[in-house]
């Protein structure tokens, strides 16, 4: 385990301890001054402890999603403060919503959680976390400056741009970078005494494996487009971080992250997928929200099932084969909104298709039943997809799940939509729903995949509510 990983674990452990101490401080204040207690209780109850502990855990999960435990040393004080404030805002909104639900359906009016207590917890917890990050930043700076915990880097390009990058890191050794040398398609001699040219661009994969390289920085002239593309596409980027000096950047990659090493701007080529930690947190949130929504919608579920069975022949639940993550098929569930045999009738209606691309849409689709039209406009037909979320076939937020025949007509860039679990809602729904053409929907889905965050998911969920209530664009 590296020293940097140790420090990241130390920061996380310190954050947990700070959360526990903050809750303990609230407890002591509640004993001394009879504040921060939930109404209907004479003391700081177990429910109160769980309530405040949930805030701490939600905030720390979002901080982890922001990558703060891996990048603490590189963020400015302002960025650190913004990350913490964003995470605390998300935790506050989720906890207030959960408190409202619990008070309405679970614990009842006899136990009302203290909202003022959450604000008091933030007032104690937030400064502690900021102080921890300041201490971690200074600790890493000292260790980097003394030569410890240095990440191994190779610079692609031994020309003037490469020299500037090398000199930048040599002058600022506290940034924690150990430049092993250069690779260059043309230059064979070292541009700076003592730092070798290790080979050509073709040697880069071997050097990465042999030397344990963690980062590759591209510092080539703007004319070397093909070499930049080769470095990104030959598999090297799956093993190390690839960064591009902006002045050298001339190729239109879409998955980029502009970052700064104390005044030296670079572009990191990002991976268009979630890592294991992000997948785990997104999945945990899916299970939480799906369980909550299933409990809330159970009475409505029963009413709709009866109504569908009484108004048309056939089962109440319609199952349709869709493609999910990595093109895996699954049975997506909806309340049936069409007549039986609707899929077989589609071929006769193809010439009346109003959607562009591989999708099929008709505003006045004759296959839709009167009840089905109401269910669709109110998005009530999608309630059974909560079960798809619980099964792991879908997520609450994600790209629209396509039909197999639609995917067979995809272009190459459309296939990226299959990189994540499809969603019940997404950017496509809150940006116009069925009024969007397919290319616009695909563009929004790709933007979501490449820019995913807990905050983005929360914004989409919150925007879905007025979109559904307005019924605009749904048919």
Image: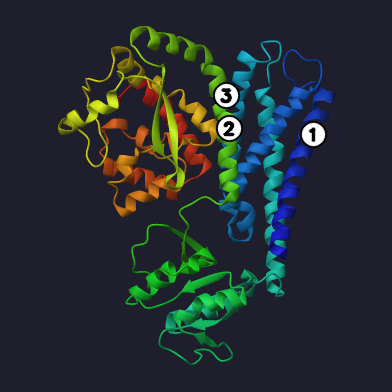
Q: Nearer the viewer, residue 356 or 425?
A: 356
Residue at the image position 61 percent from the left and 69 percent from the top: 175
Is 335 on the left-hand or right-hand side of 40?
left
- The residue identified by callout 1 is 25
Q: Observer-nearest residue: 353 or 51?
A: 353
Q: Secondary structure at mark 1?
A: helix
Q: CA distance from mark 1 to mark 2?
A: 32 Å
- Which residue lies under the disc numbered 2? 287
* Few, some or many residues within 10 Å of mark 3 (<14, 14–19, 20+): some
Specify which label sits upstream in the sequence, 1 or 2: 1
Q: Is residue 122 visible?
A: no
Q: Quadrant of the C terminus?
A: top left
Indicate which disc, 3 or 1, sits on the residue closer to the N terminus.
Answer: 1
Check disc 2 and report its element: helix, strand or loop.
helix
Q: Which residue is mark 3?
A: 292
Q: Residue at x 26, y 32 (%)?
A: 435
Discs 2, 3 touching: Cβ within 8 Å: no
Q: Mark 3 near mark 1, Cβ–Cβ under 8 Å?
A: no
**Residues under labels 3 and 1: Cα distance?**
31 Å
């Amino acid at each position: 385990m590296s020293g940097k990983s140790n420090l990241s674990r130390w920061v996380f452990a310190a954050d947990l301890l700070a959360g526990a101490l903050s809750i303990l401080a609230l407890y002591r204040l509640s004993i001394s001054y009879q504040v921060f207690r939930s109404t209907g209780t004479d003391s700081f109850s177990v429910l109160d402890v769980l309530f405040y502990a949930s805030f701490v855990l939600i905030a720390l999960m979002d901080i982890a999603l922001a990558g703060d435990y891996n990048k603490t040393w590189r963020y400015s004080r302002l960025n650190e403060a913004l990350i913490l404030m964003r995470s605390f805002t998300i935790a506050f909104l989720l906890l207030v919503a959960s408190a409202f639900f619990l008070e309405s359906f679970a614990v009842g009016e006899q136990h009302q959680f203290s909202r003022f207590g959450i604000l008091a917890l933030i007032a104690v917890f937030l400064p502690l976390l900021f102080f921890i990050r300041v201490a971690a930043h200074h600790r890493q700076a000292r260790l980097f400056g003394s030569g410890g915990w240095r990440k191994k880097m190779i610079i692609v390009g031994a020309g003037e741009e490469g020299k500037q990058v090398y000199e930048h890191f040599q002058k600022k050794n506290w940034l924690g970078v150990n430049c092993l040398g250069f690779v260059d398609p043309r230059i064979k001699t070292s541009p700076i005494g003592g730092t070798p040219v290790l080979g050509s661009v073709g040697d880069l994969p071997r050097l990465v494996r042999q030397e344990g390289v963690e980062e590759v920085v591209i510092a080539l002239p703007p004319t070397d487009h093909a070499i930049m593309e080769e470095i990104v596409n030959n598999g090297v980027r799956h093993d190390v971080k690839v960064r591009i000096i902006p002045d050298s950047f001339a190729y239109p990659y879409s998955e980029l992250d502009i970052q700064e090493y104390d005044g030296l701007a670079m572009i990191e080529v990002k991976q268009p997928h979630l890592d294991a930690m992000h997948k785990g947190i997104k999945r945990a949130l899916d299970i939480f929200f799906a369980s909550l929504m299933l409990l809330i919608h159970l009475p409505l579920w029963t009413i709709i099932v009866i109504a569908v069975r009484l108004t048309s022949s056939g089962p109440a639940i319609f199952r349709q084969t869709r493609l999910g993550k990595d093109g895996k098929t699954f049975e997506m569930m909806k309340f049936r909104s069409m007549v039986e045999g609707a899929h077989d009738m589609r071929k006769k209606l193809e010439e009346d298709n109003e959607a562009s691309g591989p999708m099929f849409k008709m505003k006045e689709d004759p296959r839709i039943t009167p009840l089905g039209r109401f269910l669709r406009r109110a998005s009530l037909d999608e309630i059974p997809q909560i079960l798809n979320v619980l099964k792991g076939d879908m997520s609450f937020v994600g790209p629209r799940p396509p039909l197999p025949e639609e995917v067979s007509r995809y272009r190459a860039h459309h296939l990226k939509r299959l990189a994540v679990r499809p969603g019940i809602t997404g950017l496509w729904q809150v940006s116009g729903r069925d009024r969007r053409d397919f290319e616009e929907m695909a563009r929004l889905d790709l933007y979501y995949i490449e820019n995913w965050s807990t905050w983005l998911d929360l914004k989409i969920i919150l925007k879905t509510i007025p979109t559904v209530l307005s019924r605009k664009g749904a048919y």
